[in-house]
Amino acid sequence: MVHEGVELDISTLERSELEPPERVLAAHHLAGTFYGGNILYDPYGELAALHALSQREYRKLFWVQRRCAAAQDRVLRNLGGITTMQDWHDQVMAWLFATGVYDVWAARCGVVDWDELQRKRRRG
């Protein structure tokens, strides 16, 4: 959501999704959120601690490999769940979701540094 020029990630998560902190580093859909950006509201400092940990650990090969494996598992699980018994529109939506995970896979796993690619593109 963009509000007054600021992109906000407004999500509700169960506390268990953030504990232990290593769970966040291994999650292809969460790690990038805590790696970049800023925490706007964190009255107890819990999110700031995750953010600091992500800043230190996000690009380490171990975590990159864990996130990539998690993303691959999600894609394969979603594609594997598509059956001809489903209505056509349900098959398409399942395929779109799986390919959406695949599309962000490289960026969220930290394999591709999009900022660096943009800098190279501007330099020519």
Image: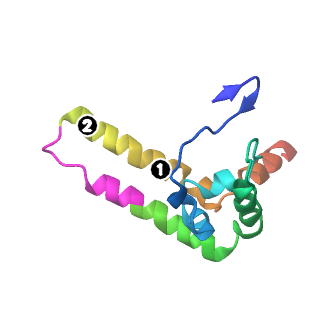
Q: Position of residue 75 (x, y in %)?
A: 40, 56
**22 in relation to 6, above or below:** below
Which of 116 and 6 lies nearest the eye of the viewer? 6
Q: Is mark 2 on a helix, strand or loop?
A: helix
What SS does tag 1 mark?
Answer: helix
Q: Estimate the x, y position of residue 122 in percent, counting from the top left.
A: 83, 42
Magenta residues span: 74-86
Crowding at label 1, few (<14), some or many (≥20) Cα neighbours within 10 Å? some
Q: Which amino acid lies under the numbered mark 2 shown in the image of this protein?
A: Asp
Q: How crowded is mark 2: few (under 14 residues within 10 Å), some or many (20 or more)?
A: some
Give the residue furthest to the front. 44
Nearest to the observer: residue 72 or residue 56: 56
Please name the residue shown 65% across and 61% down the image.
110
Q: Distance between the residues labelled 2 and 1?
A: 17 Å
Residue to which mark 2 is pinned: 90
Asked if the stretch drawn in magenta spans residue 47, the answer is: no
Q: Is disc 2 in contact with disc 1, using a CB cutoff of under 8 Å?
A: no
Please name the residue that numbered disc 1 is placed on. Answer: 101
**Split into 4 quadrants, where in the image is the N terminus?**
top right
Q: Where is residue 78 in the image (x, y as percent from the top left)?
A: 33, 53
Residue 75 magenta-drawn?
yes
What residue occupies the far bottom of the structure in this picture? Answer: 62
What amino acid does circle 1 point to?
A: Val
